[in-house]
Image (spheres, rainbow, N blue to C red):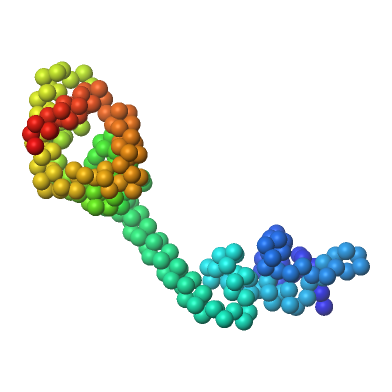
């Protein structure tokens, strides 16, 4: 009894393209051909194809199936390693589901980083954009401190976020001076924010450039002037 490629695929519950792919990667040996040139698959091919399918169902990547051949002396260790990988993936997807539940529950934007969903919808579009960037630039320790800062914003922080682009010099100066004290209090309660760039996964130089571009693009001219004055005033206050 011999089967064609189509018949073998149907019996094994897969597709002809999959059978051809397993041939290309060396997982399924090529069968002999009949006099008319058609392939003739035997029971051994079916058994091997069913084995491949079962391993794929168990989550074994195609590139690792060959290493799990019959008689493999490391089969038990390989299976345990695979189980550990699957456990890690399951934990990852559980965290993803928890994050999605938080996003839906609080109506937060989908790009909101984990841990910020409960109040992200209350932030301005600029703050939301910066938050997404911060999550990429800063480490978990900095983000935790930043989250607390957002939860306890002072009046000067709110005014800065709402500052009109045409604000006059007096308004800019007054706000910058008040932000000096706000910034000092934040650093006292969260010293992690002071040296955040040094711990960036991107490296201090890259992280600094990313943040500089973000602040220029996302803040209006008056807000940028406030930040410049704040930067100039902070050393005299420390």
Place of residue 190 in the rendered image (x, y in percent of width and height, measured from the top left)? 15, 48
Quarter of the picture containing the C terminus is top left
Identified at 74% across, 69% down, the residue is 29
> Above or below — where is 52 with respect to 97?
below
Residue at 60% in and 69% down: 65
Give the farthest residue toward the right: 35
Q: Quadrant of the N terminus?
A: bottom right
**Total residue callouts:** 0
Point out residue 43 in the picture as x, y percentages from the top left corner.
Answer: 75, 78
Give the quarter of the image for residue 207.
top left
> Residue 216 versus residue 11: which sits nearer the camera?
216
Residue 105 visible in the snapshot: no
Q: Quadrant of residue 184?
A: top left
**Front residue (pair 121, 147):** 147
Viewer can see residue 193: yes
Viewed as shown, does residue 80 lie left or right of 222?
right
* Point 35% across, 60% down: residue: 95
Q: Residue 162, percent across and down?
A: 20, 29
Left or right: 12, with 221 as reference point = right
Percent across and percent down for residue 113 are: 31, 49
- Viewed as shown, does residue 185 lie left or right of 11? left
For image coordinates 62% across by 76% down, the residue present is 69
The answer to whether residue 219 is left or right of residue 54 is: left
Compared to residue 28, the image places residue 71 above or below, namely below
Up the image or down, 45 lies above or below 38; here it is below
């Amino acid at each position: 009894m011999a089967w064609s490629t189509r018949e073998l695929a149907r019996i094994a519950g897969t597709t002809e393209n999959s059978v051809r792919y397993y041939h290309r990667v060396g997982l399924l040996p090529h069968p002999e051909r009949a006099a008319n040139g058609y392939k003739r698959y035997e029971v051994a091919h079916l058994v091997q194809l069913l084995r491949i399918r079962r391993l794929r169902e168990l989550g074994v990547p195609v590139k690792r199936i060959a290493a799990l051949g019959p008689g493999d002396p490391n089969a038990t260790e390989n299976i345990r390693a695979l189980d550990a990988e699957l456990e890690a993936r399951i934990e990852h997807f559980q965290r993803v589901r928890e994050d999605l539940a938080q996003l839906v529950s609080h109506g937060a934007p989908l790009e909101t980083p984990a841990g910020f969903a409960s109040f992200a919808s209350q932030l301005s579009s600029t703050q939301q954009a910066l938050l997404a960037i911060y999550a990429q630039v800063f480490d978990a320790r900095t983000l935790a401190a930043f989250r607390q800062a957002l939860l306890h914003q002072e009046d000067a922080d709110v005014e800065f976020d709402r500052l009109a682009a045409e604000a006059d010099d007096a308004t800019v100066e007054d706000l910058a001076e008040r932000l000096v004290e706000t910034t000092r209090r934040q650093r006292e309660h969260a010293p992690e924010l002071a040296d955040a760039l040094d711990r960036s996964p991107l490296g201090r130089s890259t992280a600094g450039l990313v943040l500089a571009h973000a602040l220029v693009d996302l803040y209006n001219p008056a807000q940028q002037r406030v930040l410049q004055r704040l930067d100039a005033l902070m050393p005299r206050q420390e």
